Every structure is written in C-alpha cells, then in structure tokens.
Image: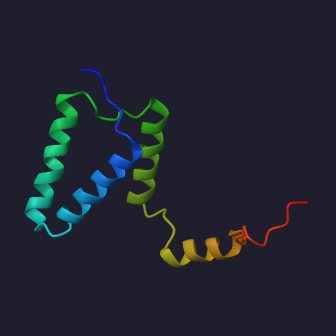
Amino acid sequence: MKKRAIPRKDFEWLMEAIGERARTYPSEAFDKLFRSMDEIERKFGLQYRPTKSERAAIDKSLRDVRSGRIATEKEVAELFRRFRRPRVNKDNASHT
C-alpha cells in the first residue's frame, strides 16, 4: 500500500480534532483507541522498529532505572537551572 502524505494543515486539524474528542473519553475508551491504533499500525506495517543501537540504549536505560540510577526531579531541575542558556529575544537581538 502506498503511503499518502497528508498536508500539514490538514494533519494538524485532524490531530486537534482527535485530541478534543479523546480528552473526554473514559479511560477504557481511551485505551481502546490506542489499541485500535496499534492494530492499524500492525496491519499496515507502520510500526517503528528501533535500530540495534537504539534497542541497546533502551535496555541500558531500563537497567539504570531498575537499579535506581536515575536523577530525581530536583536534580534535573538544578541541572537545567545551571546549564540553560538565556533566551534571546529575536526582536531585540543585534545582527552584527
């Protein structure tokens, strides 16, 4: 089956419409929506298959989480505070 690109404006409208409708779904219906999407992806061969190196990185991350080698929210926030670059206001930025 040939893939057909959906124009960006139509795709954005579609995603917004789906989001608005799904937002009010009870959890059972929401789960069924995602199971249906999984079924469609399997049927049409649209599932993403990670590369060997991506699978290795995922496995390493899972081992780290299981062994407790993860940063706390406080540690992550501190890193962002220390290393985040100041935002540049495009309107006031000089182009010299």
The total of numbered circles placed on residues is 0
Q: Quadrant of the C terminus?
A: bottom right
Of residues 71 and 67, the one nearer the viewer is: 71
Horizontally, residue 79 falls left or right of residue 53, namely right
Residue 92 location, quadrant: bottom right
Residue 65 location, quadrant: bottom left
- The x, y position of residue 90, in whole percent, is 72, 67
Horizontally, residue 89 falls left or right of residue 77, namely right
Residue lying at 10% horizontally and 53% vertically, measured from the top left: 32
Residue 85 location, quadrant: bottom right
Residue 14 vertical position relative to residue 86 in the rendered view, above or below: above
Residue 20 vertical position relative to residue 59 in the rendered view, above or below: below
- The x, y position of residue 45, in whole percent, is 25, 27
Residue 65 vertical position relative to residue 91 in the rendered view, above or below: above
Residue lying at 18% horizontally and 63% vertically, measured from the top left: 21
Horizontally, residue 61 falls left or right of residue 10, namely right
Q: Quadrant of the N terminus?
A: top left
Residue lying at 18% horizontally and 51% vertically, measured from the top left: 34
Residue lying at 61% horizontally and 77% vertically, measured from the top left: 78
Residue that protrudes farthest toward the right in the picture: 96
Of residues 34 and 6, the one nearer the viewer is: 6
Of residues 19 and 81, the one nearer the viewer is: 19
Residue 21 vertical position relative to residue 81 in the rendered view, above or below: above
